[in-house]
Amino acid sequence: ASTISEEFDVTVTICGDDTQFTNYTVTPIEDEVVAYRSLCTLEETLRLYPDGFFSEFDGDYSNGVIFYLAERINSRDASDNDDLCGFAYSDGKTYKVVISAGYLTSMRSNLVHEISHIIDYHIDDVRYYAGLSYLDEKVWSDMNPADFEYYYDYTDENDVGYEETGDREYTAYSDLYLQNFYTNGVYFVDTYSKTYPTEDRARLMEAALSEGRLPYYIGGKHIQEKLVYYFSAIRAVWDSSEWPAVTTWEISLDADHPLIPADDLLEQNESDFAA
């Protein structure tokens, strides 16, 4: 853990009996093999990001990133007994990612998802403290179908998760896509993407950093439009001057969808705000 912490300028903590979170309980990892494999997966995942990427979480607006590894994560809410894959939050000073080693086979994807959330937190902090709006939620929502609104909740009126009950229209699980592979009818990865804009982006980042071949739907014009906007915001907020010409996630963009320069992003977002 200390080696990973030093190399990537993060803090890695293997949860103990005394590790506490406000809304969740965690079970410590007792199996040394599971602990080792989870650390290997964390290291492999952090290597997907450019050198110095995580250092920029430690600056004027925050004190860096802490990764917590647990065997299990459960809600303190008695009505919700789900074993969670992970969660992320900011306590106002530090970005924190808590991940379950109980899902080793999907741990890389889960980490990418939660890292996307702290990317969003950092983008929000730059907007709040520096007044630089590189990602505007109104602009983001305008990329969705005209008749669409996010659920802004994780569960329906019966407390069942929208990943189970949500409408599959406009997703990669819609009949239109599954039967015809019509990529331009896809705006969302799945129904979970429809819960909140930040979950939409996290699912898209998972898709862009998929192991093996990229999903076919990622080439659709609406998915590409969202990816370009999100990836452009990330490059604008981070000091990307020494990044590779194409990052691991930008490989998912096609030649017809170039990144947007930072100044153009600000102008686009400010003009939309003024409108």
Image (cartoon, rainbow, N blue to C red):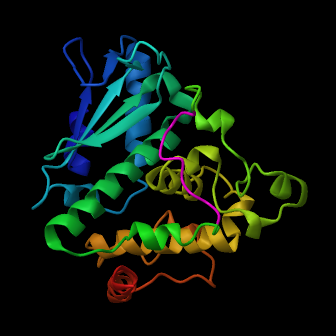
Identify the residue at image location x=44%, y=84%: 260
Q: Pick the quarter of the image with the C terminus.
A: bottom left
Q: Is residue 177 visible?
A: yes
How far across and down, in percent of the image, does residue 36 sit?
A: 39, 25
Along the line of sight, which residue is nearer the eye, 117 or 139? 139
The quarter holding residue 125 reads: bottom left
User: Which of the pair 254/223 is nearer the observer?
Assistant: 223
Q: Is residue 234 left or right of residue 94?
A: right
Q: Residue at x 15, y 72 (%)?
A: 130
Residue 146 place in picture, x, y as percent: 63, 69
Magenta region, residue range: 147-156
Residue 83 is situated, as x and y percent measured from the top left of the image, at 48, 20
Going 48% across and 41% down the picture, which residue do you hit? 153
- In the rendered view, tell whether residue 155 sits above or below residue 24: below
Relative placement, left or right, of 212 versus 196 is right
Residue drawn at x 42%, y 75% is: 232
Magenta stretch holds residue 106: no
In x, y percent, where is residue 205?
A: 51, 56
